Image: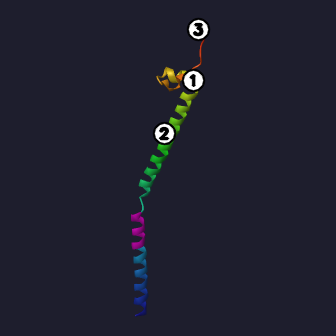
Amino acid sequence: MEAIVKFTGRAVCVGVALISSVLLISNQPSAAQASRNDVATRTQQLHSLFEEIWQYHLRTDPESATALGDNRYNDALPIVPRI
């Protein structure tokens, strides 16, 4: 009888551990989903960095900005004397 109790106790423990593991895993986003979110976040950060660099270039080189059709920095254009 004692052997049956030990076996049943182990089976219950294994069953509880298995069910707990399944519930824990099912409540968390999958690794693939987390990876996609992480890639999307890093891609957005990279695009933001590119935009920041581009705006810096336009700000520091108003002639290029004007040549590209961006007139926000026309007030910073150098004054060229007429000959």
Of residue 2 and residue 56, the one placed in the foreground of this image is 56
Under circle 1, the secondary element is helix
Identify the residue position indicated by label 1 in the image. Answer: 76
Under circle 3, the secondary element is loop
Crowd band around label 1 with a 10 angstrom C-alpha radius: few (<14), some (14–19), many (20+): few
Q: In which quadrant will I find the C terminus? A: top right
Judge from the rendering whether residue 74 lies leftward or rightward of residue 2; answer left or right: right
Q: Main secondary structure of the magenta part?
A: helix
Of residue 6 and residue 79, the one placed in the foreground of this image is 79
Tell me how many marks there are: 3
Of residue 48 and residue 38, the one placed in the foreground of this image is 48
Please, is residue 71 above or below residue 31 in the view?
above
Which residue is rendered at x = 53% and y = 22% of the image?
74
Which amino acid, by three-letter code, is at mark 3? Arg
> Which label belongs to residue 47?
2
> Which label belongs to residue 82?
3
Distance from Cα at disc 3 to Cα at disc 2: 42 Å
Image-quadrant location for residue 59: top right
Image-quadrant location for residue 7: bottom left
Instruction: State the extent of the magenta-drawn residues as a range.
Output: 19-27
Discs 3, 1 touching: Cβ within 8 Å: no
